[in-house]
Image (spheres, rainbow, N blue to C red):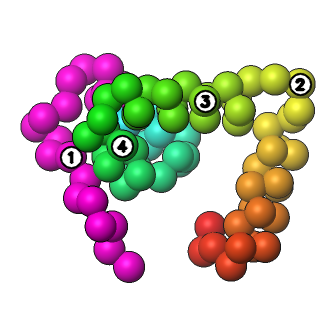
């Protein structure tokens, strides 16, 4: 299913947004299409990405356990993750 809101044009992004896209591409998450859609509202993109970073790459729970939890949640919801 195609997104209802199209991704932002790459030519319309600033350096900070480019850094977020590059970091997500390097790590393989979060989904690049989601980020390109969120980039239509820069404050929303930054709030989402900052929360993602805090949730998945910081804290006391090991990253591998967090990843297993993501996979389990996706399977419970029949998501193709």
Q: Hey, which quadrant is residue 61 in on the image?
A: top right
Q: Could you tell me how many numbered marks the image carries?
A: 4
Q: Is residue 61 left or right of residue 45?
A: right
How far apart marks 1 and 2 lie (CA) works out to 35 Å
Which residue is labeled 4 in the image? 38
Q: Secondary structure at mark 2?
A: loop
How far apart marks 1 and 4 lie (CA) works out to 8 Å
Q: Is residue 55 magenta?
A: no
How far apart marks 2 and 4 lie (CA) works out to 28 Å
Instruction: Give me the disc on residue 21.
Output: none
Give x and y (percent) for residue 20.
40, 30
How far apart marks 3 and 1 lie (CA) works out to 21 Å
Which residue is labeled 2 in the image? 60
Q: Which residues are magenta?
A: 1-20
Binning the other alpha carbons within 10 Å of mark 2 as few (below 14), some (14 to 19) or many (20 upward) gives few
Q: Is residue 10 left or right of residue 69?
A: left
- Kindly indicate whether the residue at mark 4 contacts the one at mark 2 (C-beta within 8 angstroms): no
Determine the residue positioned at 52% across, 46% down.
30
Badge 3 or badge 1: first in the primary sequence: 1
Which residue is labeled 3 in the image? 51
Determine the residue positioned at 71% across, 67% down.
74
Q: Is residue 27 left or right of residue 16?
A: right
- Nearer the viewer's eye, disc 1 or disc 2? 1
Q: Is residue 50 above or below residue 72?
A: above
Badge 2 or badge 3: first in the primary sequence: 3
- Nearer the viewer's eye, disc 2 or disc 4? 4
Residue 26 visible within the image: no
- Kindly indicate whether the residue at mark 1 contacts the one at mark 3 (C-beta within 8 angstroms): no
Determine the residue positioned at 40% across, 34% down.
45
Determine the residue positioned at 68% across, 79% down.
78
Which residue is labeled 1 in the image? 8
Binning the other alpha carbons within 10 Å of mark 3 as few (below 14), some (14 to 19) or many (20 upward) gives few
């Amino acid at each position: 299913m195609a997104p209802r809101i199209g991704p932002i044009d790459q030519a319309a992004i600033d350096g900070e947004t480019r850094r977020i896209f590059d970091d997500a591409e390097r790590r393989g998450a979060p989904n690049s299409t989601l980020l390109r859609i969120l980039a239509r509202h820069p404050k929303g993109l930054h709030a989402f990405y900052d929360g993602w970073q805090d949730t998945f790459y910081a804290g006391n729970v090991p990253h591998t356990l967090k990843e297993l939890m993501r996979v389990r949640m996706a399977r419970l919801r029949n998501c193709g993750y």
